[in-house]
Image (cartoon, rainbow, N blue to C red):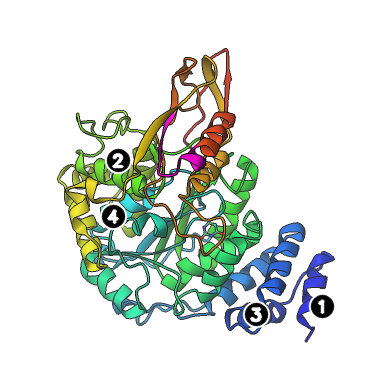
Amino acid sequence: MLLPAQIIQKKRDGNALTEEEIRFFINGFTRGELPDYQMSALAMAICFQGMNFDETMWLTRAMIQSGKIVVWRKTSAQVPKGPRALKAGDSGTHAPGHSATSFYADKHSTGGIGDKTSLIIAPLVAACGVKVPMISGRGLGPTGGTLDKLESISGFNVNLPLDEFQRITDNVGACMIGQTAEIAPADKKLYALRDVTATVSCLSLIVGSIMCKKLAENVDGLVLDVKWGSGAFMRTRESSAELARAMVEVGKRYGKKVCALQTDMNQPLGQMIGNALEVRECIEIMTSNAGVSTANQTKGAGTAATPSDLVEVTLALAAEMLLMSGVAKNVADARQMLHKKLASGEALRKFAEMIRAQGGDAKVCEDVTRLPAAKHTRPIAAPKSGFVQSIECDQIGYAVIALGGGRKVSTDKIDLGAGFEQPKKIGDPVKAGEALMVMHYNDATRAVEAERMVQQAYRIGDGPVARLPLIVQKIE
Ligand code: URA
């Protein structure tokens, strides 16, 4: 067996690692036997040199096996047997015969700005009778983290023990937690390290990170939201499609139903960016009849006929989960069911039930003013008139961090109320002095820096531009 430094050197020089070498590194790092600096060096070498598909599978497997694999009540005979070889044309699907209520499904996004679909999808899909155990992450790079958003609900506990995670998923239908010392502990440590060592944007590390959580959850079905664009880790459609294909392949080799929707992240999703603001937007959508606008609703949340970008992506991902589970026969059927659960208030009630079960203040669902809010708001003025041509969307995420709404170092405490609302989108006309978005802030000095970043992120030009497709393709 090579020394850790020799393994790093091997990857640095562009050679493939063996399964044993990858497992040695992941286990040593998880147990605290290998220091952060050696893991960081290996992660950086992987970023530069990449991994082949076998190495990526071994990395994922080592990360899954760093902790426990959930055994669901109905699944005693269905614990993942580990990866298997796939034959051409194999869909990787389970044998038919799942009843709706015994199907466990999850969705995971590769991360974006204002990307909050999980907060609606978990309760909404659970309200349709599918169990949704969801292990999420904190903010990563410029992208927001579901766990940070949930923690803006007073008392909400994302650090539950495994048996509690299972109990709430089975009793309530949905439970949202983070990686723990029991489930995916390797990712818990590596995720935090990658965030502060510029080693996030790397196909194999993303596959390992996402798929180890989802395979340790042991769900039957997984829908992936793979983003592309200026606010995503994959900047081009091609690289994001490659990431999607790799994750789908890994999932199928574990016998899961899995598909990916490739979606746009060249501009913030929805109308709010920032932890508590994003929870507020989701509650308002779930309050307002399937995304139908009402007078007191967040501007732009959309209508059932012309849903906002956030509602559209949410419904598309949730519909895939219902299709996989067999609860819906086709997309139209699924969307109708989802609209009904939103309109009847069942999705919101399920969200409140989950919040209560996880120790949080469920009254936020009736009164969003119970969420943390920044002391000040002010519009950020457009420097010139024209049409929004493009947005450096990652800079909006970094502006949230500049306001204190994300971490510069892993020990930073987050300002949960800070963020932005009502961003101008690509193609929108704008007049000089008009608001590009509204900033929510507590610290005036930080606000000056964030304002500058937002103004510089927008490219405004003379002519109108075509809008980009929100959902590019489905990859199965
Ligand atoms: N989400 C994750 O869980 N991990 C990544 O590496 C990127 C997005």
What crowding class fits label 2: few (fewer than 14 Cα within 10 Å), some (14-19), or many (20 or more)?
few
Q: Distance of mark 1 from mark 4, alpha carbons? A: 47 Å
Circle 3 residue: 23
**Secondary structure under badge 2?**
helix
The amino acid type, in three-letter code, at marker 3 is Arg
What crowding class fits label 4: few (fewer than 14 Cα within 10 Å), some (14-19), or many (20 or more)?
many
Circle 2 residue: 332
Q: Could you tell whether 371 is left or right of 426 in the image?
A: left
Q: Could you tell whether 44 is left or right of 206 in the image?
A: right
Q: Nearer the viewer, mark 3 or mark 4?
A: 3
**Secondary structure under badge 3?**
helix
Position of the N terminus, as image quadrant, is bottom right
Q: Residue at x 16, y 48 (%)?
A: 366
Which residues make up the magenta segment?
437-447
Residue 6, disc: 1
Q: Distance of mark 3 from mark 4, alpha carbons? A: 36 Å
Task: Tell me where residue 248 appears, x and y as whole percent.
Answer: 53, 58
Name the N-terminal-most of marks 3 and 1. Answer: 1
Q: Residue at x 28, y 69 (%)?
A: 169
Name the N-terminal-most of marks 1 and 4. Answer: 1
The amino acid type, in three-letter code, at marker 4 is Val
